[in-house]
Amino acid sequence: MTTTTKYQQPNVQGYYGKFGGAFIPEMLHPNVEELRSKYLDIIYDPAFQKEYKALLHDYVGRPSPLYYAKRLSEQYGTQIYLKREDLCHTGSHKLNNALGQILLAERLGKKRIIAETGAGQHGVATATVCALKGVECIVYMGEKDIERQAPNVARMKMLGATVIPATSGSKTLKDATNEAIRDWINNPTDTHYIIGSVVGPHPYPDMVARFQSIISEEIRGQLKEHTGSELPTHVLACVGGGSNAAGTFYHFLEEPTVQLIAVEAAGHGVHSGLSAATTQLGKPGVLHGSKSLVMQTEDGQVVEPHSISAGLDYPGIGPLHAHLYDSGRGVFLSATDEEALQAAFNLAKKEGIIPALESSHALASLEFLSPVNAKKTEAPIPAKAMFTKDSTVVVCLSGRGDKDMATYMKAMEGK
Amino acid sequence: MSRIKELFQQKKNNILNVYCTAGYPQLNSTVPVMKALQDSGVDMIELGMPYSDPLADGPVIQASSTQALANGMTIATLFEQLRGFRQQIYVPVILMGYMNPILQYGFERFCQDAADMPIDGLILPDLPEYEFETEYGPIMQRYGLNFIFLVTPETSEERIRRLDSLSTGFLYAVSSSSTTGKDKDMNAVNNYLQKLQDMKLNNPVLVGFGIKDKATFQQACEHANGAIIGTAFIKALENTLDVEGDTKKFITDIKS
Ligand SMILES: Cc1ncc(COP(=O)(O)O)c(C=O)c1O
């Protein structure tokens, strides 16, 4: 594997290019500093690695398969592989990170876990690992999301977690994140905050990316078995905060021949006023402790995004991705609610897999990149991102669609 | 000499700094509230610039920010309101806010406009020390703005010394690691303030967070140069029909 890390790791201050850092009030300094000074030593301790790897294998169900999607490949005229994070325990990639962080929290001697959640997938993953370790778990969730995501709220409760509604501001994921951060400020010694994506103050973006990097580590080995080469030509993932994308890109970041394609949620359309396409609409700013691209008004107030998928409904993006966008290393596309729905139904019929709505955004982008009848996009796509019939394309199927059945049922009624 | 420095030279004890949110309770309340605070005998004013995601604040101050934003408050509007305010307000005024709105306004432009008013200093809780030193501190300095760092009971002695050396004006001692508006165990607070006092810092120390009435104010003042009241004052303005009268009543109760 390559040794240079132009993109993979932030500098000592937590910056990826212009983005990152730790913009936190002094009250959080001890917690964040403790984490920053210890996380690498803890994670790379052989005993930690042994326990983490064993649980990834026996509990999460890793390695997740890399599946050659034959009918999808025929449809799009190229070679498509699906990285099956949907088959992980709890139904998404979120568990990779939650598991890593609970083992870390245990070694830091923390007795109480807090987390934020939007759709509830990260909340469920966190509640799951807390049950596994017998640790108190408190999940902050926007009051509006609690109404929208009742099944996941019930799962968290059944797993023994306390779900606290975030009633401030817009009552969604960004406010749940604020409330979790406030809880951490008010409980500085006994509590660890398990952030669910590659966002937040340094070292969170790097730490979460490392825990999710198992995705691309496995892809390299599995692809070699399938094709004889560890390197695909393209890797695709959806981006909310960007953790499944960070994991999917991680071991290809320093491989310039591999195209990194990130797909954001365009909602009703990038410029409709109801969108979550942060790289298209955001400006540099500070949100939840790091400098990144942030969707905001001219006056610098953070705006509420929109996406049909609650997991992509976030007004920011991790600093790694802001840097990939800014530097041109990554290609950022977006798919609308409607395009994501179509892609979900297409995958169900073509491959017998019902994907999460988030992952369906990544699948939807196949339409724009295919060598046959590519769908035109508003902004032209760089030639290097387009597939040929011989491309090796890996799509991260970050989660399964069980949690989205209500939305899918509504879509079927409408047809 | 800066207004803040002058104040601390003239008065060493019982300094009362009161926080209010710009544009709250009404858009145009900003200057009248400040005037009422000054007329009631407040020594210094911390003026909060509302933000949608105020991490370091508790629910009461966040609600006042949400209200102020709904009233239409922006940084540009605030500077319009403040233009000429020094004809009425002579106490030191510190702007408190979060980085994001200021970055959008333009950091240098913000400092320039603040200095024009003139504002005396800034408290930006989410501006970290590294970025302060490498990027933003020199700009504030160029415009003669004081910058006040926060310390908490969890801050190590070594770090307190560092933050004290970087601060100008005063040091803001958060009375326990928490967001604004939480009740505090005053004994633990006393020990912590005693420690700060024994350290003989360069800057005067004002205690904030959890000071809500005469008793807590006096207790805080025993070990520090003064204290900052925020949440309790915002609460006092919550349903006010008489900003001036209610402000006077609130401050008089504390100073009596
Ligand atoms: C299945 C799935 N994919 C993707 C995401 C988006 O998060 P991230 O961008 O961090 O991978 C979520 C978030 O809830 C999710 O549940």
Image: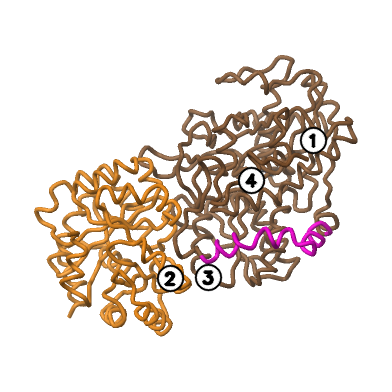
Chain colours: A brown, B orange
Residue indicated by mark 4: A9
The lab-note entry on whether marks 3 and 1 share a chain reads yes
The lab-note entry on whether marks 3 and 2 share a chain reads no
Question: Which kind of residue does numbered mark 1 sit on?
Answer: Leu
Q: Nearer the viewer, residue B211 or A25?
A: A25
Distance from the alpha carbon under mark 2 to that under mark 4: 31 Å
Residue A365's x, y, as percent? 67, 27
Question: Which kind of residue does numbered mark 2 sit on?
Answer: Thr
The lab-note entry on whether marks 1 and 2 share a chain reads no
Residue indicated by mark 2: B152
Labelled pair 3, 1 in contact (Cβ < 8 Å): no
Q: Is residue B110 left or right of residue B33?
A: right
Distance from the alpha carbon under mark 1 to that under mark 4: 26 Å
Establish whether ligand 1 lies closer than 8 Å to the Cβ of label 4.
no
Q: Does A174 appear in magenta?
A: no
Residue A169: image tag: none
For the stretch drawn in magenta, what is the main secondary structure?
Answer: helix
First in sequence, mark 3 or 1: give its number. 1
Residue indicated by mark 3: A187
Q: Nearer the viewer, residue B121 or B182?
A: B121
First in sequence, mark 1 or 4: give its number. 4
Residue indicated by mark 1: A82
